[in-house]
Image (spheres, rainbow, N blue to C red):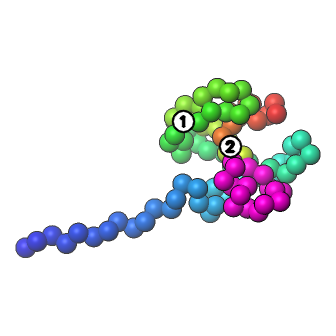
Amino acid sequence: MPRLHRRRPERPREDSLDRLIAGRKRTEMRGGGEWHVQPLTAAQAQKEYVCPGCGGVIAVRTAHLVVWRADGVLGDAADLAARRHWHNGCWKKA
């Protein structure tokens, strides 16, 4: 008997606002602005990023922070699209 091919349930997109705001997200005031800060565990860190604080690489499987504006004038979607990945220590120094 032939096998039926079933589609797998669709996974949430990587840039999904719901995925980023779930968990331990917090809001911080920095440099006269309000920022959303979302910690990522080493298990969640699946890609390599460049930290805007030091210009260094955030390696795969390295815990770090995802940061985006909370008070941008272009709306949540634009702020989320402009998010950046920071080393924990670099964000503390910023």
Depth check, front residue: 82 or 60? 82
Left/right of residue 44 with respect to residue 2 in the rendered view = right
Query: Judging from the image, what secondary structure is the residue with disc 1 in?
Result: loop
Q: Residue 34's spot in the image, x, y percent? A: 85, 51
In the displayed structure, 65 sits above or below 36; it is above
Q: Which residues are magenta?
A: 68-83
In the picture, residue 80 is in which quadrant? bottom right
In the displayed structure, 74 sits above or below 41; it is below
Q: Residue 83's spot in the image, x, y percent? A: 69, 48
In the picture, residue 21 is in which quadrant? bottom right
Left/right of residue 31 with respect to residue 25 in the rendered view = right
- In the image, is residue 81 part of the stretch drawn in magenta? yes
Q: Residue beneath label 2, please?
A: 84
Q: Residue beneath label 1, please?
A: 48
Q: Residue at x 66, y 53 (%)?
A: 81
**Mark 2: amino acid:** Arg
Left/right of residue 69 with respect to residue 48 in the rendered view = right
Pointer 1 or 2: first along the chain: 1
In the displayed structure, 23 sits above or below 84; it is below
Residue located farthest toward the front when viewing the structure as drawn: 74
Residue located farthest toward the right when viewing the structure as drawn: 32
Q: Which mark is residue 77?
A: none
Q: Residue 92's spot in the image, x, y percent? A: 79, 34
Q: Residue 73's spot in the image, x, y percent? A: 83, 59
